[in-house]
């Protein structure tokens, strides 16, 4: 089924004046405070483009005119390519899409076991998500714990690529990692030039708050830009810990951090597709834990959507939830989060499937439940279509007072367009529900997940290409392990 395009952005939490004030504060921070960029080639490039650079402190200060010039080349419309055209995602500042779960270390499996994630789980969970109609961009939902962690991103790449047709939201571990992923993608697409033209993966660059670009992340950003690989330039803020406690103050810090990254990408390769991104969550002052399910977190993401669009950049928001099992808490946290994001114009609702326990745990059942929640949220976000056909004046006149619309042709014509048809939600009354087994949503999700995994066995790559991909991934990982041990003196 082709990925459907829909628009949103009805919910606004910031006024035009608020946005101007946040922008002016961001300019002041970039010009007077600057950002620490821990990579000398980046410092040199930014100096050559008009930034003030303190090489000893590794601080870059960006004047307004330099930022404006860099942003002028950042596209607001581009395509994230799938392996087949029906999986292409048409990106702009109005469309709504979803991204799967990411990087959990543990799984809650279909037998109820909480255990370390494996490579088999990564393949199975990717295949499960691939069958969900409300998932548009694939992430690596778990990091297998039985493999060497150095160079794990190469193993993720080959495993995910074999099990989905969707664009892959990837991550790196330095410049060589990006080169390895480009080379692996070229095996699938036929050449590195084709990867540059129609990349089937993206790279997320996670920035550190406050106002720091770690060297390894800058390497990934610059290398990705060279190959025209789209970038999610992501700030991961915690108000009250790494950014100001106020949402307004956090919006300023996030924006300065992200815009510095966008500017650098444009300096490397003007026109590099960049997505303004956050996975921020509040610091819970009671537990001192990160909280993605808090209402303040959703408010922050909703506001950030407006800030990103102020710069005419697509926006990725959304994060994990706090619940530790697929229960009522998981349901309300996910529903409020994804609905808030969908209504406020978040273009990519991130980590929207399968993630619980503050992104530490991936659940097979929660994947199916989240798909259901997303279906309802996206249906609400579509809004109401008003035209002569939907106003139905002639139909109302024809049926008249006391009539019945159930058998009318107008109902037959439109009921599938206006209705949302759930897959695991119960709408039966008690007696009929009991006849069907009296199962709760978690039980129904378990059955649905098992059914999908039994039936959904797509083959997106030929056996030869899949085998070559695995060999390349394992070879690249061995090289990464060797380099890490050499640097550590082992």
Image (cartoon, rainbow, N blue to C red):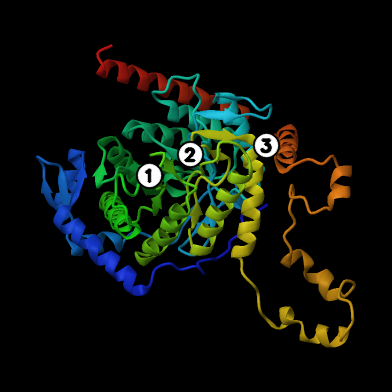
The CA distance from mark 1 to mark 3 is 46 Å
Instruction: Give the mark nearer the N terminus: 1 vs 3.
Output: 1
Instruction: Give the mark nearer the N terminus: 2 vs 1.
Output: 1
Callouts 3 and 2 close, C-beta under 8 Å: no
Give the vertical position of 362 relative to 226 (above or below): above
Q: Which quadrant would the C terminus be assigned to in this image?
A: top left
Q: Position of residue 121 (x, y in %)?
A: 59, 28
Q: Nearer the viewer, mark 1 or mark 3?
A: 1
Q: Position of residue 244 (x, y in %)?
A: 28, 52
Q: Residue at x 33, y 46 (%)?
A: 225
Q: Residue furthest top?
A: 490
Give the vertical position of 25 relative to 172 (above or below): below
Classify residue 123 by image quadrant.
Answer: top right
Numbered badge on residue 358: 2
Mark 1 burial class by Cα count in 10 Å: few <14, some 14-19, many 20+: few
Q: Which residue is mark 1?
A: 285
Q: Is residue 461 visible?
A: no
Callouts 2 and 1 close, C-beta under 8 Å: no
The CA distance from mark 2 to mark 1 is 15 Å
Mark 2 burial class by Cα count in 10 Å: few <14, some 14-19, many 20+: many
Q: In the shown orientation, is residue 343 left or right of residue 380?
A: left
């Amino acid at each position: 089924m082709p990925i459907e395009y829909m628009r949103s952005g009805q919910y606004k939490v910031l006024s035009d004046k608020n946005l101007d004030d946040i922008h002016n504060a961001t300019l002041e921070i970039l010009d007077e405070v600057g950002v620490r960029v821990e990579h000398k080639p980046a410092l040199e490039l930014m100096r050559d483009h008009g930034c003030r650079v303190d090489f000893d402190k590794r601080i870059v200060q960006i004047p307004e005119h330099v930022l404006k010039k860099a942003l002028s080349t950042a596209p607001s419309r581009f395509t994230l390519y799938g392996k087949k055209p029906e999986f292409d995602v048409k990106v702009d500042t109005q469309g709504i899409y979803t991204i799967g779960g990411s990087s959990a270390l543990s799984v809650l499996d279909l037998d109820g076991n909480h255990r370390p994630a494996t490579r088999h789980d990564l393949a199975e969970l990717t295949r499960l998500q691939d069958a969900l109609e409300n998932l548009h961009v694939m992430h690596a939902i778990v990091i297998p714990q039985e493999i060497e962690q150095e160079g794990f991103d190469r193993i993720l790449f080959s495993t995910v690529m074999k099990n989905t047709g969707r664009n892959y939201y990837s991550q790196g571990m330095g410049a060589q990692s990006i080169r390895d992923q480009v080379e692996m993608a070229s095996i699938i697409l036929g050449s590195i030039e084709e990867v540059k033209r129609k990349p089937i993966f993206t790279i997320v660059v996670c920035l550190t708050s406050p106002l720091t670009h770690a060297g390894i992340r800058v390497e990934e950003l610059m290398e990705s830009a060279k190959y025209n690989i789209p970038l999610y330039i992501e700030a991961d803020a915690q108000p009250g810990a790494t950014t100001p406690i106020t949402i307004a103050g956090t919006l300023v810090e996030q924006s300065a951090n992200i815009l510095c990254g966008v500017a650098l990408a444009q300096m490397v390769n003007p026109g590099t597709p960049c997505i303004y991104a956050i996975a921020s969550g509040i610091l819970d002052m009671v537990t001192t834990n990160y909280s993605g399910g808090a209402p303040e977190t959703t408010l922050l993401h909703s506001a950030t959507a407006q800030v990103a669009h102020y710069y005419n950049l697509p926006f990725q928001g959304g994060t994990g939830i706090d619940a530790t099992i697929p229960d009522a808490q998981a349901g309300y946290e996910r529903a409020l989060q994804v609905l808030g994001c969908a209504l406020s114009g978040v273009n990519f609702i991130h980590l929207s499937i399968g993630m619980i326990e503050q992104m530490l745990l991936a659940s097979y059942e929660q994947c199916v439940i989240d798909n259901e929640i997303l279906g309802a949220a996206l249906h609400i976000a579509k809004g109401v279509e008003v035209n002569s056909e939907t106003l139905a004046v002639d139909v109302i006149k024809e049926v008249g007072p006391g009539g019945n619309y159930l058998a009318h042709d107008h109902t037959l014509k439109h009921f599938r367009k206006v209705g949302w048809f759930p897959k695991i939600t119960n709408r039966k009354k008690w007696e009929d529900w009991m006849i069907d087994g009296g199962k709760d949503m978690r039980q129904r999700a378990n059955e649905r997940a098992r059914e999908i995994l039994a039936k959904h066995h797509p083959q997106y790559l030929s056996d030869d290409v899949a085998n070559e991909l695995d060999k390349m991934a394992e070879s690249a990982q061995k090289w990464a392990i060797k380099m890490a041990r050499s640097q550590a003196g082992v």
